[in-house]
Image: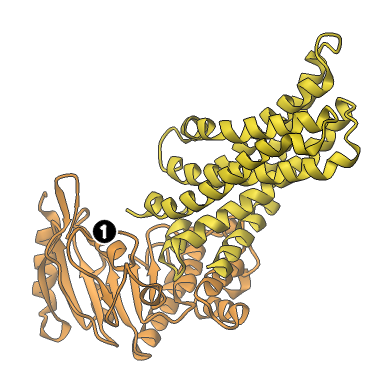
Amino acid sequence: MRTFGGRRAVDSVSFTLHAGDCLALFGPNGAGKTTLLRMLAGLLAPGQGTVRVNGIPIKEGAAARAQVGLVSHASMLYGVLTARENVEFAARLYGLPDPRDASMRALQLMRVEDRADAPARTLSRGLQQRVSIARAMVHSPKLLLCDEPYTGLDDAGSAALTAALTALREGGAALLLVTHNLTEGLALATQAAIMRRGRFVRHEARDLLDVRAYQSQYRELAAMHD
Amino acid sequence: MLAAAWLVARKDLAIEFRTRTAFLSALVFALLGVTIFYFAWDATAVAAADLAPGVLWVIFTFAGLLGLQRSFGSELADRAVDGLLGAPITRESIYLGKALANLVFVAGILVVTIPAVVLFYNLPLGGGIAALAGIAALAAVGLVAVGTLFSAMAVNTRMAELLLPMLSLPFFVPVVMAAAQSSARLMAGRPVAEAWPWLRILVAFDIVFVTACTLAFPFTLDE
């Protein structure tokens, strides 16, 4: 649980992700999705409850944070540094043995290696997003948290991201994907949840979903005023 | 922890080296300050050795603040700080890395400002230059230790440019006082031993505040 002032941004949210799982999280603006992601990434302390990655509490251990990657609303890049330098800096922070190679592989995965030596501030929003995703994946996280990662991506970028996420999942990582796009989210998901007013109002396995009914309910929830 | 701190410091220094805006601003401010004080000085009323220490350390304080203002600015621009906080490094190593980069910045200012003051005021330092460098190093550590912490606290507020000096300047008083008093004795040609009581204050300040600020820093960033 997490409150801001008197408002519960995240309330009684509890779930488990196993290796290879992908939880697609939907919800209207202000539902608490970003707050939940920041708590899972160790950027925000929960008022109550614990976040564990492979059994290690996220706030207590660098070992837990080493397994988590975050793609956020903001690019999390240093504008003056090049794309490669940004990703390489992340690779060094995560203690990778060959940060230079790892950073180039990550940029290649997101098909932005030809702009590796361009300062991040000179890149378009879409290219910055690709570099940001490369930065989040460079250390092959066991848990990847994505907050609307498809925002700003063109078709090529979206395809690269979907391929990268699929490869990560097949490699044993768990994903949590926040998106407003039901099609994108459900394409990768093994679980789906709808969040509203800090709570999961629906949470089930993807296999059990009737997609049309789900879309209809989501539209109704999104249209409600909080 | 030290390896992570060095990574953070290297990144900050790379960013500052690319832009050079903060460093050049602080340097120009320092040299202008030395020049203006020189032309405002009545040599018949005040001896050079009496005025120069005050000029040096006042300019050092405000030029240092210019550098400290930008310390966390690059982290907040696109929430790059989230990348640091989410990484498997301690908060203390982020502080030490930032402080180290700020120390290099401040040292760069001093390397230019001290010779400028010596030149303008025609100070016969001779063998005292090593002692003056030591005083400068101790003062820089104290200023940077406190300034880095308050820079992190102020950067998230609307009035960061005002808040940082308001928070920091009271804590800078012991540093500036001790540095000015000890360097005044050197510039007046007095033995180094006369400056020891003030140097002890500087050393004690550095030990206490580097430790305290390192321990307090995690609370400034964690939500």
Seen from the viewer's position, the closer of residues B107 and A111 is B107
Dot 1: element: helix
Q: Please determine whether, in this image, residue A134 is positioned above or below residue B109.
A: below
Q: Residue at x 62, y 70 (%)?
A: A116
Seen from the viewer's position, the closer of residues B149 and B206 is B206
- For the colour orange, the matching chain is A
Amino acid identity at mark 1 = Thr
User: In the rendered view, does A212 fall on the left or right side of B10?
Assistant: left
- For the colour yellow, the matching chain is B
Q: Residue at x 51, y 62 (%)?
A: B93
> In x, y percent, where is residue B40?
78, 14
Seen from the viewer's position, the closer of residues A45 and B219 is B219
- Dot 1, how many residues are within 10 Å of its Cα: few (below 14), some (14-19), or many (20+)? some
| Residue B19 can be seen in this image | no
User: In the rendered view, does A77 fall on the left or right side of A162?
Assistant: right
Q: Please determine whether, in this image, residue B188 is positioned above or below residue A28.
A: above
Seen from the viewer's position, the closer of residues A115 and A13 is A13
Mark 1 chain: A
Per the image, the residue denoted by label 1 is A35
Q: Residue at x 68, y 51 (%)?
A: B104
Q: In terms of image quadrants, where is residue B63?
A: top right
> In x, y percent, where is residue B49?
82, 24
> In x, y percent, where is residue A46?
23, 61
> In x, y percent, where is residue B192?
79, 38
| Residue A141 can be seen in this image | yes
Q: Residue at x 88, y 30 (%)?
A: B119
